[in-house]
Image (cartoon, coloured by chain):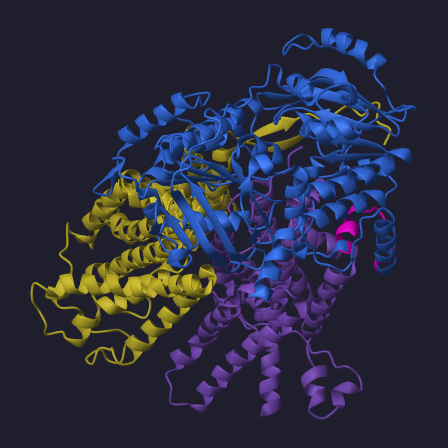
Amino acid sequence: MVGGMKPLAENKKKSGDTAQTVRRASGDVLLDGKGLTKRFGEILANDRVDLRINKGEIHALLGENGAGKSTLVKMFYGALEPDAGEIIWQGRPVQIDNPAAARSLGIGMVFQHFSLFEALTVVENIALALPDPGNMKALAKRIESISSEYGLPLNPQDIVADLPVGIRQRIEIVRCLLQEPALIIMDEPTSVLTPQEADRLFKTLERLASEGCAVLYISHRLEEVKRICHHATILRHGKVVAECDPSRETPSSLANMMVGTEVIGVSHGAKAPELGPARLKVTDLSAPAQNPFATTLNDLNLAVHAGEVVAIAGVAGNGQGELFDALSGEIQVAPGMIQIDGQACGAKSINWRRQKNAAFVPEERLGHGAVPGMTLTNNIVLTRHGTNDGLVSAGFVSDGQSGELEQKVKTHFDVRMSHDNPEARSLSGGNLQKFVVGRELDRKPGVLVVNQPTWGVDAGAAALIRQSLIDLARSGSAVLVISQDLDEIFEIADRIAVISRGFLSEAEAASGMTRERVGLLMAGSAERSKGNDRKAV
Amino acid sequence: MRIELVKRKEHSRLMAVLSPVIAVFLTLIAAAILFKLAGKDPLLGLFTFFIEPLTDTWSLQEMIVKATPLVLIACGLAVCYLSNNWNIGAEGQFVFGALCGSFIPIVFPDFETVLTLPLMLLMGALGGAAWGLIPAILKTRFNTNEILTSLMLVYVASLILDYLVRGPWRDPDGYNFPESRLFTDAATLPLIGDGRMSIAAPIAVLVVIVLTIVLAKTLKGFEIRVMGESPRAGSFAGFSKKRLTLFAFALAGGLAGLAGIMEVSGSLGQLLPTISPGYGFTAIIVAFLGRLNPAAILIAGLVLALSYIGGEGVQASMGVSDKIAAVIQGLLLFFVLACDTFILYRPRIVPGRPATGSEI
Amino acid sequence: MFEAVLLTVITAATPLLIAAIGELVVERSGVLNLGVEGMMIMGAVVGFAVANQTGSGTLGVLAAIVAGMGMSLIFGVLVLSLVTNQVATGLALTILGLGVSGMIGEAYIGVPGLRLPELYIPGLSELPFIGPVFFQQDAVVYLGFALVALVAFVLFRTRTGLILRAVGDNHGSAHALGYSVIKVRYLAVLFGGGCAGLAGAYMSLAYTPQWVENMTAGRGWIALALVVFASWLPFRVIAGAYLFGAVTVLTFHAQAQGVGVPSQLLSSLPYLATIAVLVLISANRRLTLVNTPACLGKPFVPDR
């Protein structure tokens, strides 16, 4: 039904046919975007996009990373100015100059990476989004009443920095609700929630819809889109390629519309991997928080064996970064807490561990895994200078050697670039991630620790990366994946453990795990049982 | 209509080369305006300030004499700034190095051997490094802001110098003038040419060459650049931020100290209450004008040295205050910083939207 | 004697107090202006020159404020509109200020200066001891205290202050909510410049009523340190400024009394004290991390 580059009119006609037959929420048109276009330099982020939202409708906006979803909603929210096209709001053409204008029209937004101020209190954060917040005490009262009415209780005087992500999202939602919005835009709202928290959010959304408020729901979690959305618009490469009623589709048909081709699943090769010896062993790992906003690690235990992929699930900010840093050696702990192939290395440097054939891929690609303003050749040197690859002799770096390695990684992992040896920051997220992962896999590490391997990466690159992680494990390496993406975890993991507030649950076979069980562990049930254990001892 | 900045996908190599050139050009225009404001002929002013010193050998030698400490200090500062260590106290490190290096010729004037000079230079460099290490240690141990501590130490070093030349180190035969005894020949840097130029100048060139190679070709140079751009990625590469901070400050302090003792031993011949016309601060401008690249710093050092001599020139022949040199130096730094913006960003003109159809 | 010391402490502390409270506002908006010294010295020379030319101390003070704001505007254009490195630009501002002030001031070296008149608060100023110390000061001293109170009130009790703190905490979010980060920061930078100019004028019109080259002698830098010392809280600036005022004055008196210590050592005490205080404050990671404006010194380019 859809073809990537077909002219818009054709697409529209085809999708229009479907649109007439799909179930739309009753009610009039609330927002009608016509021919919206936005260009950033050479990239056409939105190409004559049409989008119509009815009153009281939960409308999904689907698309891969970089398809133009964020750009489109930012134009509705007044954060970006369209280069062409018009927005009709409740029947009148409007120019939304800034977010304040959007809010005064009745458009609220819940951001993916929250637009909150960590040093300020909940009530101050909310006051900043209101045109006339009035007396702070009265506002605090209103916040308490509205938030408990919608089942999202908040304490107005809490400082945001001290609050977990789930609560932070509530602040954003309550902030929208206080403005009695007609449309709430939500950007990937469940990406930071446990499944149970997400269920609670869906109830709130359904209630809002029943009260006549429309929701524009951006997500790439197709299960939940299918479950709660009345209508979906699908973007690809900045264009609308389809509209549908998600409840009549399957997740895989939705995925096909987003990607444009059949989505490649990963293959696990040998069904049950032959488990070898533990190559990465974590024993009673504890580490104090490095700063006031960090998480303390408490008695973590885990073994990753040759031949398996172990995944650590968890909501952001529960100690994943700290665990990664301890495993890689960026923070050092007691020697026996971490062993690589039986050698205690908790207090050794990251390069010592690399020399023992361990490799690491951090969550942040730009600024941690790679230096943004340096060329790829230089970024090869970043992790390979200490691993006897012949890159450095007598203190001098060999440009030839690093150039060769860069070429190798580029070809093996299909890293696409506009010209030879560009700066890391000019690569797209997917290509840079392929480079950063490829740089380590090229060494055939015996132990690989990777944090969020496919975060913000397009489906093609994600499939390639996931497959190469499985292949590495099957070749006898131990692979530890830290991820917040449950789909990814269930796709690639042999065993799953869950991290919550710095506590780690015991790793269990993926085949015996359910999403519900993972969700409960994410919400801290492991932590409680740990605490009880300790009391018992 | 408005102008906005758009981040480039990659650094512009063209602008990286053009930026200092454009900055110098803009400074010339500003200088012409300054001369006009002072009621002088702008063209004559520019000529006297920027061209005339280049026409006679004495001025040229003097230019090299002044460029030498600027280049040495700026090389060290470049390493600091590249690695994101904001050492602005080079003036203090210069002074303290000069003090330490002067210990032998002032306290033991009779120690006259071939070792005298090398020892003096070594002590000067070590003294400067030690002074530079104070803010570095405070930064690494206590997380103290190095900008403020390194600057405060400038005042302290100047006061120590003042105390010594007025007190214990005053020349016993100097009729109570606040100055030390004159250095003996064994404690004086060999001179080159007929002016005040000494072997300090070739030493500075040597430092430039070595540092160019270190920064461009070695792992240490790579470490310095990585740490400056992205400390997190640096620690992922296994580099230690703290060790590099100590290294950068020690190197910058050492070079400043070396410049200090060579200035005293080569050009002044004795300690005075003031031994620097603000070399440590002017070197900051040199470092930025040279875009933190040692080879370019060599040229930038000559440009700034020219501004000192040009300032003296316009005062002598046109009656314009030599303070105009400091103004021109300050303006130059502003223009350099402004032009550097366009290495990372490109300007874009956004036409205003026609005000039709807007309801708000 | 004690009364006289206290009086000089107040005059020594006032310029630090005013410059620091201005910089505190700038830093609360997320901008680090290291050019306080340069703006202050410009305020000092312009204040002195205008007062000298017009015979009016008030005009001198006003001109100094304008000069400080003019300097900060240059800084603002570079740092906010051209996104230059804030540390380097602040340094450039100081270098430029020292140069330009030297040039303007050449004509005024050795010229007798004008002293700001003292304001006598009727009734209160006749009180013994308390009267002369607290109620017979020049207007700028009172203005300094008023500024601190005003800044504290605006920062923590008004919407303007809330927006300012929000911009300094997270400029991305502030922009997303529709606040003009750049505009807020321009205003904060101008306020800081005005305060630095005023502090400079106080140096050349009240503290030592004359023009001497480099007469601010690092006070701009000490004011920067005071902001850290105060951990970005207005009322703590008063404590810091008076502490430093006291150190400065005590060294003067010690020198006058002929304490058997080299005068240079005494003169270096304020600088050494600054270092000591910075070390003590910054060693407390929790305190500094929690209060430091999270966007301090970070460049911001709005996308639109």
Q: Position of residue C190 (x, y in %)?
A: 65, 53
Q: Residue at x 25, y 69 (%)?
A: B100
Question: In x, y percent, where is residue B338?
Answer: 51, 40
- Residue at point 39% right, 32% down? A441
* Residue A507: x %, y % from top left: 53, 45
Asked whether, in this view, residue A517 is left or right of residue B216, the answer is right
Q: Is residue C222 magenta?
A: no
Q: Is residue A171 found left or right of C201 in the rendered image? A: right
User: Is there any visible trace of residue A207 in the rendered image?
Assistant: yes
x, y percent for residue B290: 37, 42
Nearer the observer, A98 or C223: A98
Magenta region: which residues?
A123-136
**Residue under the point 85% across and 38% down:** A104
Q: Nearer the viewer, residue A529 or C58?
A: A529
- What is the quadrant of residue B177 in the picture? bottom left
- Residue C62: name its quadrant: bottom right
Chain B is shown in which shade? Answer: yellow
**Total numbered labels placed on residues in the image:** 0
Q: Nearer the viewer, residue A378 or C30?
A: A378
Q: Which chain is blue?
A: A
| Position above or below: C200 against A343 | below
Q: Which chain is purple?
A: C
For residue A134: magenta? yes
Residue at 68% x, 8% y is: A7
- Image quarter of the N terminus of chain C: bottom right
Q: Quadrant of the C terminus of chain C?
A: top right
